[in-house]
Amino acid sequence: MAKRDVVFPAGRQALYERNRYSPAVRSNGFLFVSGQVGSREDGSPEPGLEAQVRRAFENLNAVLAAAGATFDDVVDVTVFMVDPQNTFERIWTVVPEYWGEAPFPNITAVGVTWLYGFDFEIKVIAKLPEGQAG
């Protein structure tokens, strides 16, 4: 197997190394981004649901930017929510701040019981712009 073409956002490499995963991997013109949560620089959860969702998107955007991409390049989204019956509407008030204009990427939303102390996680696949395919 070829060595993985890993993308690290600035300032968070130690956090990823400590947890033993790559934030994103480039492959065949795509960027596969690991689930991003609303974690602060030290890895602790951002307090408050809406603030945590915003931080998750900011962390995601930092990974995309490190690969020369933006959310406009995202083609596939998976979100995980703890207690979606009670949190979905609150989460979805924040999403339009980051989602951009139509046409939108596809999405799969999954309700879960545990996210390592977080309430929201977003995982994406992006089609890298020409020249950024790695």
Image (cartoon, rainbow, N blue to C red):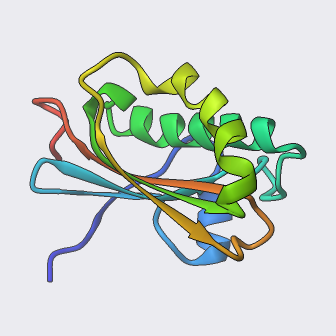
> Is 2 left or right of 44, judged from the image as shown?
left
- Residue 23 position (above or below residue 63): below
Residue 56 horizontal/vertical position (percent)? 63, 44
Q: Which residue is most to the front?
A: 85
Quarter of the image where one finds residue 97: top right
Please count the marks in the image. Answer: 0
* In front of the other: 69 or 124: 124
Q: Quarter holding the N terminus?
A: bottom left
> Is 91 left or right of 95, judged from the image as shown?
right
Q: Residue at x 17, y 30 (%)?
A: 129
Q: Residue at x 64, y 75 (%)?
A: 19
Quarter of the image where one finds residue 93: top right
> Is 120 left or right of 47, judged from the image as shown?
left
Residue 118 horizontal/vertical position (percent)? 75, 61
* In front of the other: 21 or 78: 78
The reply to whether residue 76 is visible in this rendering is yes
The reply to whether residue 55 is visible in this rendering is no
Q: Which residue is most to the top?
A: 101
* In front of the other: 44 or 118: 118
> Is 111 left or right of 123, judged from the image as shown?
right
Q: Which residue is most to the bottom?
A: 1
Residue 24 horizontal/vertical position (percent)? 39, 57
Q: Residue at x 52, y 36 (%)?
A: 62
Q: Residue at x 20, y 38 (%)?
A: 128
